[in-house]
Amino acid sequence: MQIHPPAAIKRRTAVASMAGFLALAAVSRPALADALSNIEKNKKIRISIDPAAPPYSTKDAQLEYAGSEVDVARLLASDWKLELEIVPTNPASRIPYVLTDKTDLVISTLSITPERAKVIDFSVPYSGIQVVIGAPKVVALRSLEDLGGKRVAVVRGSTNDTELTKAAPAGTQIVRFDDDATAITAIISGQADCYCTAPALLAPVNQRKPELAMESKVVVKTNLTGIGLHKGETQLKAKLDDWVRENLRNGKLNAIYRKHHGADLSPEVMRTATA
């Protein structure tokens, strides 16, 4: 468990994290600007996905990958007539996998932020994700100021972690976990009072422990998500951008999102199609 740090410590932590990414970027392979040619030559595309973030991505009863991000990856591979290799990842390794050429792309609820854009490139937004504070229905939580003294579970190193760390008041006890699966278990077992996550990830908590009646209490921020790729791959990025816009216009990306989340993509995402 970690007590919410003073502002100066938070700034040092953020700087250290970004410095680590920048150092990794400096020693990773140089951008060859021919990743698309290599993908087409191999007739295979490697896409990183975190399998512990339902309904975005998970493994079903047959241990097959499932979820909205998985369907996006499958649609892309199908449209490009490529074999899809899913490379399992977690929030902490999503960007390093791109930088060290363990994967061609990452489609894993990767919010587009200025800090991340310093080390990798993004496609235009294909989806969006809210950062919310979820808590049981009986918990009175009307604003971020009400988090003082409460234990808030969050995935370590995620955008949710970054936004929570910036916004939470002094006295908030931020409890960090390696992935959503362990964070959900912590909520169910009483190791945390609240959960900083996407609204869709409150459903698995209620499925496993309905009496909690977890609900979204406070919206911290709404982020747009993009497909991550190595910097400098201009041809690959251009093809990705065209693919995203086309599948927003024809409704396929919205259909995938509605299937798994029970709602349509936000207007901010849909505007990508006409940008």
Image (tube, rainbow, N blue to C red):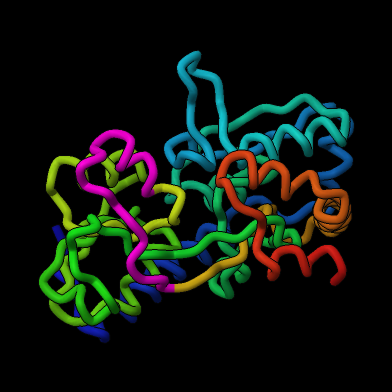
Residue 17, located in which quarter of the rendered image?
bottom left
Q: Is residue 95 in the magenta section?
A: no
Residue in the image at 81% along x and 54% along y = 248
Find residue 68 and report its horizontal and vertical position in percent: 61, 40
Find residue 119 and report its horizontal and vertical position in percent: 60, 65
Q: Nearer the viewer, residue 43 or 263?
A: 263
Query: Is residue 129 at all visible to an observer of this figure?
Result: yes
Q: Nearer the viewer, residue 240 or 151?
A: 151
Find residue 125 and report its horizontal and vertical position in percent: 70, 62
Residue in the image at 33% along x and 60% along y = 196
Residue in the image at 15% along x and 76% along y = 148
Please determine whether, in this image, residue 160 is positioned above or below residue 97.
Answer: below
Q: Nearer the viewer, residue 96 or 171?
A: 171
Residue 160, located in which quarter of the rendered image?
bottom left
Please determine whether, in this image, residue 180 is positioned above or below residue 160.
Answer: above
Please determine whether, in this image, residue 28 is positioned above or below residue 56.
Answer: below
**What's drawn in magenta, residue-wise?**
202-220
Query: Is residue 48 at all visible to an observer of this figure?
Result: no
Question: Which image quarter is the N terminus in?
Answer: bottom left
